[in-house]
Image (tube, helix red, strand yellow):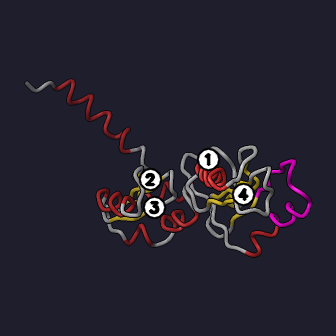
Amino acid sequence: MFRPALFTALLAAMPAFAQDVPDRDTARDLLFGTRNADIAIIRQDFLSEADLATLQQMPQVAQLNYYGAMAAAPADGLQAEATQGAFNFHSLEAARAAAIAACNGARTGGPACVVVAEIRPRDFEPGRSLTLSQDASRAVTGRDLRRAGPDGRLAISASTGFWAVGDDEDAALAACSAQGASDCEIAVAR
C-alpha cells in the first residue's frame, strides 16, 4: 500500500542526507590552503632546549604534510627509536592517535608516550566542519577531483589517512579500501 505522507517524509529527508557530503566548491571554501604547513611544539618536561630546537628545525629538513603529530616516550627522550611521527592524516586527532600508538608500540618501558609536536595547516583554526590531509586537500582544490567526471567522489580513511578519488562513489570507496583501510567514507562529491 502506497502511503503519500511516508513517501513525502522520506523525500524531505533525502536532501539533508545528501548535504552531509559537501560538493567540490563548498569543500574548497572549507579547506585550508595547501602550500604550507606549520609546526606547533607541545612543550613537555623531559624535552631539553636542544630537543626543542631540533623540533623547530624539522620543517627545514623534511617535508611534513598536515595533519601530523610526533610522539615521544618520556623515559626514552626525543632522540630515541620510540619517537614516532604520523603525517598526512585528515585531522589532528587522528594524527595524534596514530603517533601515540606507534610510539607506545616502540617504547621500552616507562610512562606512556606523549605528543611533542603537531603539523597543522598555515593559519590553522580549530572547528572547521571539513578537514582533509594536505594531499587530499590538493586533490579537491586542484584537478584530481574535477578530472574524475561529473559523479566523481573523494573517499577518505580517518584512521589511516588514506584517500582516493573515483569516478563515482563505489569506485572511490573501492580505491580507498584497496590501500588497506577498513573505514573509508565519502568526504567530497564533485
Residue indicated by mark 1: 93
Front disc: 1 or 2: 1
Measured in 3D between alpha carbons, the distance from the residue under mark 1 to the one under mark 2, in whole angstroms, is: 17 Å
Residue placed furthest toward the bottom: 61
Residue type, numbered disc 3: Trp
- Determine the secondary structure under disc 1: helix
Give whichever of discs 1 and 4 has the lower sequence position: 1
**Image quadrant in which the N terminus is located:** top left
Circle on res. 187: 2
Residue type, numbered disc 1: Glu
Front disc: 3 or 2: 3
Residue 149 lies in quadrant: bottom left
Give whichever of discs 3 and 1 has the lower sequence position: 1
Give whichever of discs 4 and 2 has the lower sequence position: 4
Residue 152: % across, % down: 35, 63
Residue type, numbered disc 2: Ala
Residue indicated by mark 3: 163
Magenta part of the chain: 40-56
Measured in 3D between alpha carbons, the distance from the residue under mark 1 to the one under mark 4, in whole angstroms, is: 18 Å
Q: Are marks 3 and 2 in contact (CB under 8 Å)?
A: yes
Give whichever of discs 1 and 2 has the lower sequence position: 1
Give whichever of discs 3 and 4 has the lower sequence position: 4
Residue placed furthest toward the front: 108
Q: In the rendered view, tell whether residue 72 sits above or below residue 3.
A: below
Front disc: 4 or 2: 2
Q: Are marks 4 and 2 in contact (CB under 8 Å)?
A: no
Circle on res. 123: 4
